Amino acid sequence: MELSGKLVVVTGAARGIGRALVMELAKSGCGLVLTALEEEELKSLEEELRKYSVSVASMPADLSDPASRMNLINWILSLPMNPDILINNAGIGGLFGKFEDVDLRIIEAVIAINISALVHITHELIPALKKRPRAKIVNISSGIARLPYPGLAVYGATKGFISSFSESLTCELAGTSVSVLCFHPGFSMTHFIGSSRMDMRKIPRWMIHTPEEIASRVVLAMRKDRQWDYSDLTTMLAAWLGANIPSRMKTRIFKNLFWRLPDAK
Ligand SMILES: NC(=O)c1ccc[n+]([C@@H]2O[C@H](COP(=O)([O-])OP(=O)(O)OC[C@H]3O[C@@H](n4cnc5c(N)ncnc54)[C@H](OP(=O)(O)O)[C@@H]3O)[C@@H](O)[C@H]2O)c1
């Protein structure tokens, strides 16, 4: 897909992978419709984007709140042009720890942002996307989507949802102008990792990527009209192995991986 001149909606645009994606898209000549939680972060991003001569509009919204989501959707639909691309990037991990010990309110926020918001925004924007001659939905999942993720069990499951949902949407939208890309990033040292308080010290350096590296792979996958992609070979191989070894073996391996829980035996 040629990206120049396309209007792209990006959620979670202000930091990390989202911010790096916005920069890549601006360099490619895309118009941008941006949202994140914090207004100030969005304003600083708009300021940074001034050096590119692309149109930028932004609105803060709390994606964990259905009313705030609806305001955002109505604002997007009231813009003079329909979007060509929707990038569902916003996501939180919650707090690293045993499922039973994590505060239920945090767990509910993870489900609301990672699943409910993505489904809500996608549902409401598909009719507008279908009006464009070529359109795309990009869902940012995770390399862990179909693997166990002890310590971030609900987060991992939300990413499994996103990957499954993306495949079903791909089937349903076949024959329309809208295609779907489900992208699976590996680790990146963003605010996401800091706020989940995951201990990254044992994770080999070569497994950690910059947000810019991940963003450039997402944009390449968009240009090549890929339906399913990973940020790097290790993430792809881990996902492939996870899908092809028996569950008992998989859980044994993942129970003792780098991010093991302190009391894992
Ligand atoms: N980092 C990794 O290792 C990794 C690995 C695999 C997949 N991913 C996925 O990549 C995506 C981006 O992650 P990241 O690492 O770039 O995270 P990040 O740096 O923490 O950025 C998350 C973005 O989501 C926004 N956001 C958070 N809570 C929100 C809410 N309640 N309402 C609206 N927006 C909200 C944030 O807005 P503010 O800036 O305003 O707070 C921020 O712009 C996520 O879907 C994540 O699951 C990340």
Image: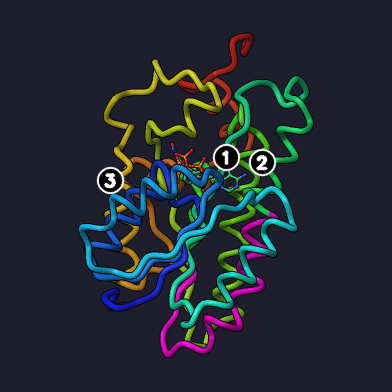
Q: What percent of the width, then of the height, locates residue 234? A: 34, 40
Q: Nearer the viewer, residue 216 or 25?
A: 25
- Which residues make up the magenta segment? 116-137
Q: What percent of the width, then of the height, locates residue 79? A: 51, 77
Instruction: Name the residue located 48 percent from the left edge and 25 percent from the top edge.
Output: 194
For numbered disc 1, what is the local secondary structure? loop
Instruction: Name the residue located 42 percent from the left edge and 41 percent from the top edge.
Output: 238
Query: Is disc 2's CB within 8 Å of ligand 1?
Result: no
In the rendered structure, the answer to whether residue 159 lies left or right of residue 259 reads right
Query: Is disc 1's CB within 8 Å of ligand 1?
Result: yes
Marks 1 and 3, how far apart at CA:
19 Å
In the rendered structure, the answer to whether residue 252 lies left or right of residue 28 reads right
* Circles 1 and 3 in contact, beta carbons < 8 Å: no
* Circles 1 and 2 in contact, beta carbons < 8 Å: yes
Q: What percent of the width, then of the height, locates residue 233? A: 31, 46
Looking at the picture, does residue 219 appear above or below residue 224? above
In the rendered structure, the answer to whether residue 111 lies left or right of residue 168 reads right
Q: Nearer the viewer, residue 118 or 217?
A: 118
Instruction: Name the residue located 20 percent from the left edge and 57 percent from the top edge.
Output: 51
Q: Is residue 94 magenta?
A: no
Q: Tell me the kind of residue under disc 3.
A: Glu
**Residue 185 can be seen in this image:** yes
Colouring rule applied to residues: rainbow
Which image quarter: residue 210? top left
For numbered disc 2, what is the local secondary structure? helix
Q: Tell me the kind of residue under disc 2.
A: Val
Q: Which mark is residue 92?
A: 1
**Residue 182 can be seen in this image:** no
Q: Which mark is residue 212?
A: 3
Which image quarter: residue 95? top right
Residue, disc 2: 110
Marks 2 and 3, how far apart at CA:
24 Å
